[in-house]
Amino acid sequence: MADIKAGVNQLFLREEELRTGMELLFYAYREFTAEPDEILAEIGFGRAHHRVIYFVGRYPKITVSELLAILKITKQSLSRVLGELVRQGFILQQTGVRDRRQRLLELTEKGVELERQLSETQRQRIARAYRMAGAEAVEGFRKVMLGMLDDEDRAKFTPPLPARLAAVKR
Amino acid sequence: MADIKAGVNQLFLREEELRTGMELLFYAYREFTAEPDEILAEIGFGRAHHRVIYFVGRYPKITVSELLAILKITKQSLSRVLGELVRQGFILQQTGVRDRRQRLLELTEKGVELERQLSETQRQRIARAYRMAGAEAVEGFRKVMLGMLDDEDRAKFTPPLPARLAAVKR
DNA sequence: CCAATCACGTCAACATGGCTGACATAAAAG
DNA sequence: CTTTTATGTCAGCCATGTTGACGTGATTGG
């Protein structure tokens, strides 16, 4: 009897724990995007513009297809927002040198400024959370988040071979 | 000179660390919603339906305004999806007893079944991540995620006073 | 070298899920 | 009995995703 009760309690705790995780993700993501969304709305942009600005800033000279692979949206969806960003001078397209079919994307100064402004509140939010939680908790956070990803996305956070070798050598 | 270099490196690490956090959130959220989205698409529903189903399942007898406060969308947006869910027999509305203006929402059996099906992949994903990361990491994850929330949402995860008292008594 | 493939762009049409504003009704509360 | 509250509804707009079709210039493989 005690065993059964303990088992049920185990299940309940587990269920509750998992739901907490789901909800943390829901609320965190929503609040994480709320502040940039407000800024974006003022200049007639949306969250999609932010994502493009962010990843172009993150990976200068990124190609359109690489960006598509990260965002996992169709090129038609991307071209709408990307076109606006280019026309309004936030992003620069340069024809690739090795492959002249490619359009290499880069933030202009104006783009860098917007990126900084948009991500600032998010950086602050994360920095605050990291500070409050402590280094050990941050490591746990990273571990759990990585565990939620599929292999493909998880690989983005695994240093590529050269860096791994360097780490081993140390 | 060494100080400056160290300082710069500090800043770089910090910046990189924060960006990693931002991206983990982006990728994790996307993958977290991808599988339910597929199931939902098959039956002509969207993510909004899932959220309603989820929270009605989570808080049986919830009122419309409580649900609105959780989801933070307009009643017009909610009524579109809620109406479909009610008409198609996933959710039951009962007039409140104490306050007859209220419509208390509950999942039907059909609703419970759909909720279970939708959340199953998510539960598995989280369970897997928790298992892989270990109990300590999970605690860190919770801490960091809580730190990202505004007070209002964070309060949802703080046990209400009675429970806190009980915990102290123990 | 030329046909096939590739990177990218564009047009058109549609769905989902947010939003605002206006108005309605029944119940509760002061 | 007037006001406020909880809910619902109609109508229209916007952002962002989708599919499908088609075009153009650059690259590449047989």
Image (cartoon, coloured by chain):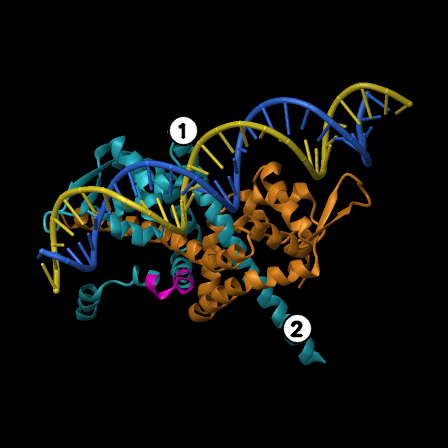
Chain colours: A orange, B cyan, C yellow, D blue
Which of the two labelled residues, at mark 2 and mark 1, occupies the earlier sequence position?
A: 2
Q: What stretch is highlighted in magenta?
A: B145-152
Residue B119 in the image: state x and y as whole percent: 35, 41
Please give the residue where the numbered disc 1 appears in the rendered image. Answer: B42
In this view, the residue in front, B104 or A126, is B104
- Which quarter of the rendered picture does the N terminus of chain B lie within? bottom right
| Quarter residue B160 falls in | bottom left
Q: Nearer the viewer, mark 2 or mark 1?
A: 1
Residue at image location 60% in from the left, 50% down from the top: A52
Q: Is residue A17 visible?
A: no
Residue at image location 43% in from the left, 42% down from the top: B33
Residue B73 in the image: state x and y as whole percent: 36, 50
Residue at image location 51% in from the left, 55% down from the top: A41
Position of B24 with respect to B165 (left or right) is: right
Q: Does the magenta stretch include residue B58?
A: no
Which secondary structure lies at badge 2? helix
Kind of residue indicated by mark 1 = Glu
Please give the residue where the numbered disc 2 appears in the rendered image. Answer: B8
- The chain holding disc 1 is B
Q: Residues within 10 Å of mark 2 (few under 14, many from 20)?
A: few
Is disc 2 in the same subunit as disc 1? Answer: yes
Residue B59 in the image: state x and y as whole percent: 24, 48
Q: Residue A21 carries which label?
A: none
- Above or below, comparing residue B152 to residue D14 in the picture: below
